């Protein structure tokens, strides 16, 4: 059950796309960055695990779950370049990891928690909750929409003060699809005495990750996006000095265990996504991670270009970072509730996209994955003006 036959058929992307046969027929799914989607080989493996769980729940939860999670944890840790012998905690999503990290750091009244205006909203909420509990303050660094990596670093570091205790930094931002230079930001912040929490919701599989080299204080990334695991599973890594302080927000049978086991024991929660996650990693490796990444990035670039042309947007004003298969295009009109526009694009054009609202601007964000094709972006570009 832990093995996966090679799904690579002679370089024919159409055959690869056929593996995602659960997607709605005739609908262009250009929002992989939103919730992810696993191929058939992975969902079948998850179904096998669920069948074992249902066949004998007592045996499964008492004898099979813990070893299965250890296997999955080791696979994720190795995939993410964790230090040799290290493990990661497999949790529900990146926000759960960020919340657990923030709850464990020493924070007092008068301290500051630094976030950016590109941060995922629930991660910022987690920072506000933690800061509010102790009388600390959340400070937001403004990062220009189209600045380069050096500009991102400068904007973040300029917001650091002697009271900055913790910084929550995106690896790849969700709303604006920007790749933050974490390789420079992490050591620069740590050199200033700041605890660094990396929100890497999109990074696993999308980008090569080397946790041993990056060495943040905390790092959490979803495996159910570009790591092709089932929803919902994320890898959470913490530097050794912080592990004894980590607590599961839900008191369960792992309460007195050490990291990562204390964060993974949550009663009868369905853990089949975690158990099947090594199959997602194996799927990516069988196709060739670099080959997949290059395909996805080129497709995202194409999508951004045709949308920019359709909306009369100067491509030179649009950000696009190396290795990121998500792109945004600002819309010429703003919407109070972009969810209405998202639903109309889905219903009228048969295209699923993300429509984030960032700093008062309504953006159109498209993702690219191996089940997408250029014609799907053409369909969106051809119909978007009629909706606007």
Image: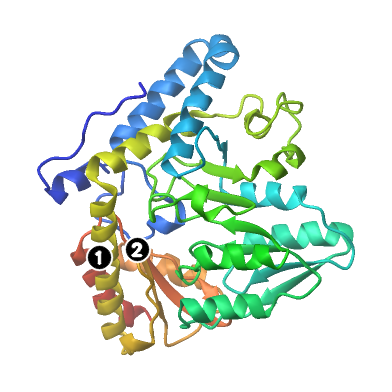
Compared across the picture, whether 326 is left or right of 247 comes to: left
Residue located 38% across and 50% down the image: 205
The crowding category of the residue bearing disc 1, from other C-alpha atoms within 10 Å (few below 14, some 14 to 19, many at least 20), is many
Compared across the picture, whether 178 is left or right of 243 comes to: left
- 269 is higher (above) or lower (below) than 221: above
Asked if marks 1 and 2 touch (Cβ < 8 Å), the reply is yes
- Near-viewer residue (307 or 261): 261
Residue located 69% across and 49% down the image: 101
Location of mark 1 (residue): 299
Tell me the number on the disc at residue 325. 2
The crowding category of the residue bearing disc 2, from other C-alpha atoms within 10 Å (few below 14, some 14 to 19, many at least 20), is many
Residue 179: percent from the left, percent from the top? 46, 68
How many callouts does the rendering have? Answer: 2
Residue 8: percent from the left, percent from the top? 17, 40
Q: Kindly tell me whether residue 153 is visible in this rendering.
A: yes
- 172 is higher (above) or lower (below) than 203: below
- Near-viewer residue (212 or 332): 212
The mark nearer the N terminus, 1 or 2, is 1
Compared across the picture, whether 256 is left or right of 371 comes to: right
Compared across the picture, whether 109 is left or right of 293 comes to: right
Q: Quadrant of the C terminus?
A: bottom left
- Separation of marks 1 and 2 at Cα, in angstroms: 7 Å
Residue located 38% across and 71% down the image: 321
Q: Quadrant of the N terminus?
A: top left
Residue 12: percent from the left, percent from the top? 11, 48
């Amino acid at each position: 059950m832990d093995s996966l036959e090679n799904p690579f058929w002679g370089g024919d992307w159409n055959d690869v796309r056929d593996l995602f046969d659960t997607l709605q027929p005739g609908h262009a799914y250009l929002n992989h960055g939103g919730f992810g989607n696993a191929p058939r080989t992975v969902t079948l493996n998850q179904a096998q695990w669920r069948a074992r769980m249902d066949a004998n729940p007592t045996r499964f939860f008492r004898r099979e779950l813990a070893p299965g999670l250890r296997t999955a944890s080791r696979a994720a840790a190795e995939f993410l370049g964790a230090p040799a012998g290290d493990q990661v905690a497999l949790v529900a999503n990146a926000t759960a990891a960020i919340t657990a990290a923030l709850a464990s750091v020493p924070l007092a009244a008068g301290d500051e928690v630094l976030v950016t205006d590109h941060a995922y909203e629930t991660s910022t909420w987690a920072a506000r909750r933690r800061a509010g509990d102790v009388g600390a303050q959340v400070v937001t660094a403004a990062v220009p929409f189209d600045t380069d990596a050096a500009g991102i670093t400068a904007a973040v570091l300029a917001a650091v003060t002697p009271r900055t205790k913790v910084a929550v930094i995106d690896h790849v931002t969700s709303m604006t699809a920007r790749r933050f230079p974490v390789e420079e930001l992490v050591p620069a912040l740590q050199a200033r005495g700041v605890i660094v929490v990396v929100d890497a919701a999109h990074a696993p599989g999308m980008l090569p990750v080397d946790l041993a080299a990056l060495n943040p204080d905390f790092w959490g990334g979803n495996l159910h996006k570009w790591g092709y695991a089932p929803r919902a599973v994320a890898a959470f890594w913490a530097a050794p000095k912080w592990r004894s302080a980590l607590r599961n927000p839900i008191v369960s049978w792992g309460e007195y265990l050490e990291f990562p086991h204390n964060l993974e024991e949550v009663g009868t929660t369905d853990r089949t996504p975690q158990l099947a996650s090594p199959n997602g990693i194996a799927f990516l490796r069988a196709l060739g991670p670099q080959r997949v990444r290059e395909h996805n990035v080129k497709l995202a670039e194409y999508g951004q270009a045709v949308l920019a042309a359709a909306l009369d947007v100067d491509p030179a004003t649009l950000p696009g970072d190396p290795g990121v298969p998500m792109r945004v295009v600002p819309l010429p009109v703003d919407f109070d509730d972009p969810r209405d526009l998202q639903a109309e694009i889905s219903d009228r054009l048969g295209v699923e996209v993300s429509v984030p609202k960032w700093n008062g601007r309504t953006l159109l964000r498209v993702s690219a994955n191996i089940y997408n094709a250029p014609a799907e972006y053409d369909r969106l570009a051809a119909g978007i003006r009629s909706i606007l």
